[in-house]
Amino acid sequence: MLPAPILDLFDGQLPEFLPFEDYQRNYIELVLEHTAGKVSDKDGAAQILHMNPRHCSAK
């Protein structure tokens, strides 16, 4: 299992409030970066996020 990342989505700052969808997208992108783009299988982003792999994208 990969080590847990530091979850700093805003570099320690939140200059403005974001729509929830933007926050979600940032979080999904962080998880995908942590998994080196791996979506499915063990230790993939979908497993970490408890999501269906088909729905796990940061579009």
Image (spheres, helix red, strand yellow):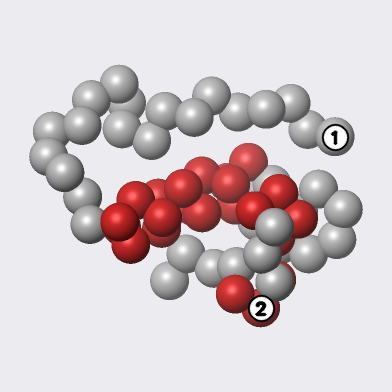
Which quadrant holds the N terminus? Answer: top right
Residue 48 image point, x, y percent: 71, 49
* Residue type beneath disc 1: Met
Residue 2 image point, x, y percent: 78, 33
Residue 14 lies, with reference to residue 50, above or below; the image says above
What distance separates the C-alpha of mark 1 from that of mark 2? 22 Å
Number of other residues with Cα within 10 Å of mark 2, as a class: few under 14, some 14 to 19, many 20 or more: few
Work out whether residue 3 or residue 37 is closer to the camera in this orientation and state it: 3
26 relative to 57 in the view: left or right: left
Name the secondary structure under disc 2: helix
Q: Which residue is mark 2?
A: 54
State which quadrant residue 20 falls in.
Answer: bottom left
Residue 16 lies, with reference to residue 37, above or below; the image says above
Residue drawn at point x = 40 percent, y = 50 percent: 26
Residue 58 lies, with reference to residue 6, above or below; the image says below
Number of other residues with Cα within 10 Å of mark 1, as a class: few under 14, some 14 to 19, many 20 or more: few
Q: Which residue is mark 1?
A: 1
Residue drawn at point x = 87 percent, y = 53 percent: 42
Work out whether residue 7 or residue 19 is closer to the camera in this orientation and state it: 19
* Residue type beneath disc 2: Arg
